[in-house]
Image (cartoon, helix red, strand yellow):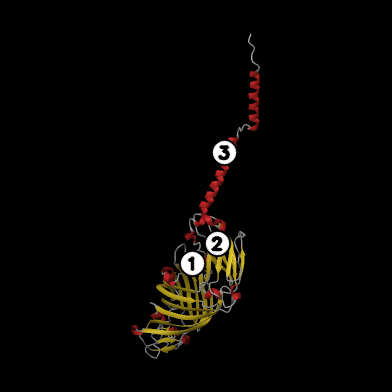
Amino acid sequence: MHQPSASRPRTLLQLGAILAALLLVVPPSFGEGDQDDSVSQDGVEQEKKKEQEKKDFKTCVAPDFDVVWTSYDSFKLVATADPPQTFVVNLKHTKKPEKETDTHWDLEVESSLPCPDNVDVEIEGRDLRFCVHASPEGTSAQVGVAARGPLLKAGGLLGFGYEPLPDDWEDVEKDCPARLGLGQHSTLRVLEKHSIGFDVGFVYSLENGKSFASNPEAAFFARSQWSERFLLGIEARYSAISASDEPDPADDGGMDGDGGGEAMADGGDDEDPTFNPFENGDEGVLEADVFLSIVPFKKLPRFGVVLGAGFSTLPGENDFTATKSRLFGGLRLNVDGINHGRKGSDHFSNARGIAQIDDAEDKLFEAVVLRAASEDGTVPAVVSDESERIRLTGEIELPPLGNSKIRLVIRGHASLPTSGDGPADIRLSALASFDPRDWFKGLGGSDS
């Protein structure tokens, strides 16, 4: 009888031992595929997040930088960007000052990220370099200047540039260097040295103390602040004037000269008594002034004295033109547009205005009719020299809205006789104003 071979169990035992060794060396990886899938998914999400951040940054929405003066020698540089980004900002005096101390800077940056080690920060000399984290709400850097003189010498401009942090440069360089102005030299307007404009609209003149008569009005102005203490200006205005009070009618009592006036008949003197500025000027009078404003105090708003001269031209008797001279001196408050942005700004802080009170000798009013002549001509008109005047002028120029370049001007003017006898010239104006430099860039745009 055949006996089974003893080698078969031995072989089976050997195969089992080999299989056990393999299992110990290479353990089963049940569930490892799920873990790899989880890790892979996290990586994909992170990559997507990074790509989205790069996409947001690559939208090339250039930041806005607005300048808002908070005191005579300090302004806020407000940086706005959406999405938020950190930029290295460079400011530089473009003109060499008479004194080196005139270019010293003070700097305080709020809500900002510190500059990394590979970015140099400079706050001395003619250059200012710092980091600011621009946010949708706007982040400001308080910048102090030692003097306004170098800024005015440079036309109110600072050398200006900005760039992303070096770590972000690679992401931006491929897509939008031109749109962000990277590597380009630019300027930032921080002061308005020169201002010019045309105003067109309507004037409302108080007539006989009852109502306001409406007439067209047009004006031109040019002002230049050529030093910290002196401002020179020229203004020309075509407007209409009306008497605030109607002359009293003549009575049979004769020429008693009430009100300090002098009774005159037609053609009775070198000064034509029939030339009534209120009657002749109701259809339009051309006024022109040149003035010098002296500002002794380094404060905002700028307050000082004003001296000037001018003339008025309007139709005279027989349609001949009459020109009357004017001298004046007084006090003037200049409210500059304290907000100047690289791309402009809708902030109300960019409003400009003046307030002035002066004592004037205005020959336009040297023959004011206080009492009209009688209808039959037997009683002549009573005419008074009311050329000594107190003048009050106020004007506010609101900033344009949106992308519009038209500004709204509200102006009030009152010319009152110091004697208190004659009628006053009281006017309210609503005007649209535009700067020709905004339309003709060859003149140097106001935001250039």
User: Counting residues from the N terminus, which is met first, the one under dot 1 or under dot 2?
Assistant: 2
Q: Nearer the viewer, residue 330 or 114?
A: 114
Q: Nearer the viewer, residue 258 or 390?
A: 390
Q: Residue 73: x percent and y percent? A: 59, 72
Asked whether, in this view, residue 275 is left or right of residue 124, the answer is left
User: Counting residues from the N terminus, which is met first, the one under dot 3 or under dot 2?
Assistant: 3
Q: Residue 193: x percent and y percent? A: 50, 74
Tell how many labels. 3
Q: Which mark is residue 399?
A: 1
> Which amino acid lies under the numbered mark 1 shown in the image of this protein?
Pro
Residues at badges 1 and 3 in contact (C-beta under 8 Å)?
no
Q: Nearer the viewer, residue 401 or 442?
A: 442
Report, in whole angstroms, how far the alpha carbon at label 1 lies from the one at label 3.
59 Å
Identified at 65% across, 29% down, the residue is 21
> Which amino acid lies under the numbered mark 2 shown in the image of this protein?
Ala
Are there few (<14), some (14-19), or many (20+) residues within 10 Å of tag 3? few
In which image quadrant can residue 130 be found? Answer: bottom right
> Which amino acid lies under the numbered mark 3 shown in the image of this protein?
Asp
Asked whether, in this view, residue 111 is left or right of residue 201, the answer is right
Q: Identify the element where label 3 is drawn.
A: helix
Q: Nearer the viewer, residue 252 or 72?
A: 72
Q: Residue 152: x percent and y percent? A: 53, 75
In which image quadrant can residue 270 be found? Answer: bottom left
Report, in whole angstroms, how far the alpha carbon at label 3 lies from the one at label 2.
44 Å
Are there few (<14), some (14-19), or many (20+) residues within 10 Å of tag 2? many
Is residue 134 at all visible to an observer of this figure? Answer: no
Q: Which residue is mark 3?
A: 37
Q: Which mark is residue 79?
A: 2
Report, in whole angstroms, how far the alpha carbon at label 1 lies from the one at label 2.
20 Å
Q: Identify the element where label 2 is drawn.
A: strand
Which of discs 1 and 3 lies nearer the camera? The answer is 3
